[in-house]
Image (spheres, rainbow, N blue to C red):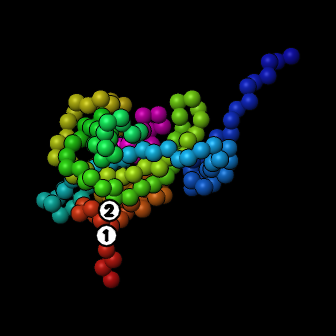
Protein backbone atom coordinates (compact mmCIF):
# COMPACT_ATOMS: atom_id res chain seq x y z
CA UNK A 1 0.00 0.00 0.00
CA UNK A 2 1.36 3.42 -0.92
CA UNK A 3 1.31 6.21 1.65
CA UNK A 4 -1.42 8.75 1.06
CA UNK A 5 -0.28 12.15 -0.12
CA UNK A 6 -1.11 15.19 1.92
CA UNK A 7 -4.20 16.87 0.49
CA UNK A 8 -3.17 19.85 -1.59
CA UNK A 9 -4.93 23.16 -1.24
CA UNK A 10 -6.65 24.26 -4.43
CA UNK A 11 -4.63 26.90 -6.26
CA UNK A 12 -6.31 29.76 -8.06
CA UNK A 13 -5.72 30.09 -11.79
CA UNK A 14 -3.71 33.32 -11.78
CA UNK A 15 -4.56 34.12 -15.40
CA UNK A 16 -8.15 34.81 -14.32
CA UNK A 17 -9.46 38.15 -12.97
CA UNK A 18 -9.28 38.52 -9.19
CA UNK A 19 -12.92 37.59 -8.52
CA UNK A 20 -12.63 34.37 -10.53
CA UNK A 21 -9.43 33.51 -8.67
CA UNK A 22 -11.18 34.10 -5.35
CA UNK A 23 -14.16 32.00 -6.44
CA UNK A 24 -11.79 29.04 -6.83
CA UNK A 25 -10.69 29.39 -3.20
CA UNK A 26 -13.71 30.82 -1.33
CA UNK A 27 -12.13 30.24 2.07
CA UNK A 28 -9.62 32.98 1.20
CA UNK A 29 -12.40 35.45 0.47
CA UNK A 30 -14.04 34.89 3.84
CA UNK A 31 -10.88 34.49 5.91
CA UNK A 32 -10.40 38.18 6.64
CA UNK A 33 -9.62 41.56 5.22
CA UNK A 34 -7.44 42.32 2.24
CA UNK A 35 -3.79 42.94 3.12
CA UNK A 36 -2.26 46.31 2.36
CA UNK A 37 0.79 46.84 0.16
CA UNK A 38 2.44 49.92 -1.36
CA UNK A 39 3.82 50.12 -4.88
CA UNK A 40 5.74 52.53 -7.07
CA UNK A 41 5.10 53.60 -10.64
CA UNK A 42 8.67 54.64 -11.43
CA UNK A 43 8.95 56.84 -14.51
CA UNK A 44 11.37 59.04 -16.39
CA UNK A 45 11.22 61.27 -19.43
CA UNK A 46 12.86 59.82 -22.53
CA UNK A 47 13.44 61.01 -26.09
CA UNK A 48 14.37 64.55 -25.06
CA UNK A 49 11.49 64.76 -22.60
CA UNK A 50 8.71 64.12 -25.12
CA UNK A 51 7.99 60.53 -24.03
CA UNK A 52 7.39 58.91 -20.66
CA UNK A 53 9.03 55.59 -19.82
CA UNK A 54 7.84 53.33 -17.00
CA UNK A 55 10.07 50.88 -15.16
CA UNK A 56 8.87 47.28 -15.07
CA UNK A 57 10.74 44.54 -13.25
CA UNK A 58 10.43 40.77 -13.05
CA UNK A 59 9.26 39.06 -9.89
CA UNK A 60 11.85 36.90 -8.17
CA UNK A 61 9.84 33.67 -8.07
CA UNK A 62 7.90 33.52 -11.34
CA UNK A 63 9.83 36.07 -13.46
CA UNK A 64 6.56 37.72 -14.51
CA UNK A 65 6.48 41.47 -15.12
CA UNK A 66 5.51 43.58 -12.09
CA UNK A 67 6.18 46.98 -10.54
CA UNK A 68 8.13 47.50 -7.28
CA UNK A 69 5.86 46.92 -4.28
CA UNK A 70 5.90 45.57 -0.76
CA UNK A 71 4.41 45.46 2.71
CA UNK A 72 3.96 48.43 5.06
CA UNK A 73 7.08 49.31 7.08
CA UNK A 74 7.00 50.25 10.73
CA UNK A 75 7.69 53.96 11.19
CA UNK A 76 7.39 54.71 7.45
CA UNK A 77 4.60 56.51 5.65
CA UNK A 78 3.06 54.67 2.67
CA UNK A 79 4.86 56.79 0.06
CA UNK A 80 8.16 56.24 1.91
CA UNK A 81 7.62 52.46 1.90
CA UNK A 82 6.94 52.58 -1.86
CA UNK A 83 10.18 54.54 -2.39
CA UNK A 84 12.18 52.05 -0.30
CA UNK A 85 10.76 49.15 -2.33
CA UNK A 86 11.73 50.91 -5.58
CA UNK A 87 15.30 51.29 -4.29
CA UNK A 88 15.63 47.72 -2.95
CA UNK A 89 13.97 46.00 -5.92
CA UNK A 90 15.14 48.18 -8.81
CA UNK A 91 17.89 50.55 -7.64
CA UNK A 92 15.96 53.73 -8.44
CA UNK A 93 15.35 56.88 -6.43
CA UNK A 94 13.58 60.10 -7.20
CA UNK A 95 10.80 62.55 -6.43
CA UNK A 96 7.90 60.71 -4.78
CA UNK A 97 4.28 61.91 -4.85
CA UNK A 98 2.90 61.73 -1.31
CA UNK A 99 -0.65 60.88 -2.39
CA UNK A 100 -1.50 57.62 -4.14
CA UNK A 101 -2.38 57.86 -7.82
CA UNK A 102 -4.52 54.71 -7.74
CA UNK A 103 -4.73 51.19 -6.42
CA UNK A 104 -5.13 47.66 -7.66
CA UNK A 105 -5.92 44.25 -6.19
CA UNK A 106 -4.26 40.89 -6.69
CA UNK A 107 -3.71 37.55 -4.99
CA UNK A 108 -0.31 37.12 -3.32
CA UNK A 109 1.04 33.64 -2.79
CA UNK A 110 2.67 33.70 0.64
CA UNK A 111 5.83 31.81 1.62
CA UNK A 112 3.73 29.16 3.41
CA UNK A 113 1.71 28.46 0.24
CA UNK A 114 -1.41 30.30 1.36
CA UNK A 115 -3.00 32.92 -0.89
CA UNK A 116 -3.80 36.40 0.44
CA UNK A 117 -5.88 39.03 -1.35
CA UNK A 118 -3.96 42.34 -1.41
CA UNK A 119 -4.73 45.97 -2.16
CA UNK A 120 -1.76 47.92 -3.50
CA UNK A 121 -1.82 51.73 -3.20
CA UNK A 122 0.35 53.16 -5.98
CA UNK A 123 2.68 56.15 -5.71
CA UNK A 124 4.48 57.93 -8.57
CA UNK A 125 8.24 58.28 -8.44
CA UNK A 126 9.93 60.50 -11.01
CA UNK A 127 13.29 58.77 -11.18
CA UNK A 128 16.37 60.97 -10.80
CA UNK A 129 18.93 58.29 -9.81
CA UNK A 130 19.54 54.81 -11.19
CA UNK A 131 22.08 52.57 -9.47
CA UNK A 132 23.47 49.23 -10.56
CA UNK A 133 24.17 48.35 -6.93
CA UNK A 134 20.98 47.52 -5.02
CA UNK A 135 19.67 44.82 -2.67
CA UNK A 136 17.91 42.59 -5.24
CA UNK A 137 20.36 43.11 -8.13
CA UNK A 138 20.76 39.91 -10.11
CA UNK A 139 17.39 38.60 -8.92
CA UNK A 140 15.28 40.67 -11.32
CA UNK A 141 15.30 42.00 -14.86
CA UNK A 142 14.57 45.73 -15.24
CA UNK A 143 13.27 47.41 -18.39
CA UNK A 144 12.12 50.93 -19.24
CA UNK A 145 9.09 50.82 -21.56
CA UNK A 146 6.19 52.98 -22.70
CA UNK A 147 3.10 53.09 -20.47
CA UNK A 148 1.21 51.01 -23.07
CA UNK A 149 3.96 48.37 -23.17
CA UNK A 150 4.10 48.30 -19.36
CA UNK A 151 0.35 47.67 -19.33
CA UNK A 152 0.75 44.83 -21.83
CA UNK A 153 3.38 43.14 -19.69
CA UNK A 154 1.72 43.14 -16.27
CA UNK A 155 -1.03 40.65 -15.46
CA UNK A 156 -3.35 42.55 -13.10
CA UNK A 157 -6.24 44.24 -14.95
CA UNK A 158 -6.51 47.23 -12.58
CA UNK A 159 -2.75 47.84 -12.78
CA UNK A 160 -2.97 47.68 -16.59
CA UNK A 161 -5.59 50.44 -16.42
CA UNK A 162 -3.42 52.61 -14.15
CA UNK A 163 -0.48 52.26 -16.54
CA UNK A 164 -2.46 52.98 -19.72
CA UNK A 165 -3.96 56.09 -18.06
CA UNK A 166 -0.62 57.17 -16.57
CA UNK A 167 -0.03 60.92 -16.45
CA UNK A 168 3.33 62.15 -15.14
CA UNK A 169 1.61 65.14 -13.53
CA UNK A 170 -0.13 62.87 -11.04
CA UNK A 171 -3.63 62.56 -12.40
CA UNK A 172 -5.20 60.47 -15.10
CA UNK A 173 -4.98 61.28 -18.79
CA UNK A 174 -7.80 63.49 -19.89
CA UNK A 175 -9.89 62.54 -22.90
CA UNK A 176 -8.92 64.84 -25.71
CA UNK A 177 -12.03 64.45 -27.79
Task: Indicate the quadrant where residue 51 lies.
Answer: bottom left
Identify which residue is drawn at 19% across, 56% down.
45
Determine the main secondary structure of the stretch shown in magenta. Answer: loop
Q: Compare marks 1 and 2 and give the one earlier in the sequence.
A: 2
Seen as rendered, the residue at the extreme right is 1
- Viewer-nearest residue: 64 or 102: 102
Identify residue for label 2. 166
Task: Reply above or below: 64 against 153.
Answer: above
Instruction: Point out residue 152 in the picture as x, y percentages from the top left corner.
Output: 42, 56
Identify which residue is drawn at 52% across, 30% down.
111
Seen as rendered, the residue at the extreme bottom is 177
Is 44 on the left or on the right of 34, as rendered? left
Identify which residue is drawn at 65% across, 47% down.
30
Residue 131's disc is none
Instruction: Point out residue 8 in the picture as x, y percentages from the top left corner.
Output: 70, 32
Is residue 104 in sight in this rendering? yes
SS category of the residue bearing label 1: loop
Residue 173's disc is 1
Task: Report the magenta residues as a range.
Answer: 59-69
Seen as rendered, the residue at the extreme front is 75
Instruction: Point out residue 59 in the picture as x, y percentages from the top left corner.
Output: 42, 38
Q: Quadrant of the N terminus?
A: top right
Is 2 on the left or on the right of 62, as rendered? right
For mark 1, does the 10 Å Cα neighbourhood hold few (<14), some (14 to 19), or many (20 or more) residues? few
- Viewer-nearest residue: 56 or 97: 97
Q: Are marks 1 and 2 in contact (CB under 8 Å)?
A: yes
SS category of the residue bearing label 2: loop
Task: Reply above or below: 4 against 49.
Answer: above
Is residue 142 in sight in this rendering? no
Q: Distance of mark 1 from mark 2, alpha carbons?
A: 6 Å
For mark 2, does the 10 Å Cα neighbourhood hold few (<14), some (14 to 19), or many (20 or more) residues? many
Amino acid sequence: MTPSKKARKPRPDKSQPLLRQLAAVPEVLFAGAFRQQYGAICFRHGNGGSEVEILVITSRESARWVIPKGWPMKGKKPFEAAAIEAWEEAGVRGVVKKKPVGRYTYLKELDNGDVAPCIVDMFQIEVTEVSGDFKERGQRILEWVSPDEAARRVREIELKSLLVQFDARGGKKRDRG
